[in-house]
Image (tube, rainbow, N blue to C red):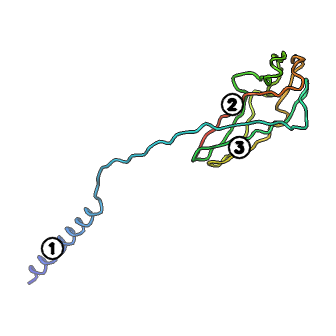
C-alpha cells in the first residue's frame, strides 16, 4: 500500500509538472508579422514680416520686425532660427525703376534664435527687436520705398 501511495504521489507530481509545463507553453507563444505605415507630406511654412507701420525706415535706423508664421501641416512645428534668405532686399517696382537698386536693407544679425511653437493648421508670431536696418549706402531713390527682405526659417517637429 505504501508503494501504491508513493506511485500515486509520483504520478500526481508528474501530472502537475506536465500541466504547469503546458500552461507555461501557452504563455510563451511566439510569432512574426509585419507592420506598415505611410509617411506624411511636409508643407512648407509661410512667413511674412512687418515692421511697425508708423515708424519709417531710414539710413542708420533699426526697426522691430514682427514675423508671422503659418503652419498648414497636420502636426505641430517649432521654429528655432530665423536668418536672412539667400537673396538681398529689393524695393517695390516703382522705386526700383526709379533707381533704388542698392537698398542697404538687411537683418541686423545673421541669426535670430527663437522658440516659436506653432500648432497644426494655425499661425503664430514672434517679435525680433531692432531686426531690420538700413545702411548709409542706400540709393537716394529708395526714399519712400517698400522693401521685400527674404527670410529663412528652420525648425522641427517633435510630434
Crowding around mark 1 (Cα neighbors within 10 Å: few <14, some 14 to 19, many 20+) is: few
Picture residue at 75% right of the left edge, 21% below the top = 88
Residue 158 picture location, percent across and down: 58, 45
> Which one is in front, 112 or 87?
87
> Which one is in front, 71 or 113?
71
Residue 20 sits in quarter: bottom left
**Mark carried by residue 81:** none
Crowding around mark 2 (Cα neighbors within 10 Å: few <14, some 14 to 19, many 20+) is: few
Q: Is residue 1 left or right of residue 52?
A: left
> Which one is in front, 67 or 30?
67
Q: Does label 3 or label 2 sit earlier along the sequence?
A: 3
Element under disc 1 = helix
Residue 42 picture location, percent across and down: 55, 39
Cα separation, mark 3 vs mark 2, equals: 14 Å
Q: Which residue is mark 2?
A: 152
Element under disc 3 = strand
Picture residue at 61% right of the left edge, 36% below the top = 44
Q: Nearer the viewer, mark 3 or mark 1?
A: 3
Crowding around mark 3 (Cα neighbors within 10 Å: few <14, some 14 to 19, many 20+) is: some
Q: Is residue 30 left or right of residue 59?
A: left
Cα separation, mark 1 vs mark 2, equals: 80 Å
Q: Which residue is mark 1?
A: 10
Figure quadrant of the N terminus: bottom left
Cα separation, mark 3 vs mark 1, equals: 73 Å
**Mark carried by residue 116:** 3
Q: Nearer the viewer, mark 1 or mark 2?
A: 2
User: In this picture, is 87 found above or below 25?
Assistant: above
Residue 129 picture location, percent across and down: 84, 37
Picture residue at 52% right of the left edge, 40% below the top = 41
Q: Is residue 98 left or right of residue 118?
A: right
Picture residue at 90% right of the left edge, 19% below the top = 136
Residue 137 picture location, percent across and down: 87, 16
Amino acid at each position: 500500500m505504501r508503494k501504491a501511495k508513493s506511485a500515486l504521489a509520483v504520478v500526481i507530481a508528474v501530472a502537475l509538472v506536465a500541466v504547469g509545463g503546458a500552461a507555461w507553453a501557452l504563455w510563451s507563444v511566439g510569432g512574426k508579422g509585419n507592420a506598415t505605415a505611410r509617411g506624411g507630406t511636409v508643407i512648407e511654412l509661410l512667413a511674412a514680416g512687418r515692421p511697425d507701420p508708423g515708424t519709417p525706415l531710414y539710413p542708420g535706423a533699426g526697426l522691430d520686425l514682427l514675423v508671422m508664421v503659418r503652419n498648414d501641416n497636420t502636426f505641430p512645428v517649432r521654429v528655432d532660427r530665423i536668418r536672412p534668405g539667400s537673396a538681398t532686399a529689393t524695393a517695390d517696382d516703382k522705386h526700383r525703376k526709379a533707381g533704388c537698386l542698392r537698398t542697404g536693407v538687411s537683418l541686423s544679425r545673421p541669426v535670430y534664435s527663437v522658440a516659436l511653437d506653432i500648432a497644426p493648421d494655425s499661425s503664430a508670431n514672434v517679435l525680433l527687436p531692432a531686426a531690420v536696418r538700413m545702411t548709409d549706402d542706400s540709393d537716394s531713390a529708395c526714399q519712400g520705398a517698400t522693401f521685400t527682405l527674404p527670410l529663412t526659417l528652420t525648425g522641427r517637429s517633435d510630434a
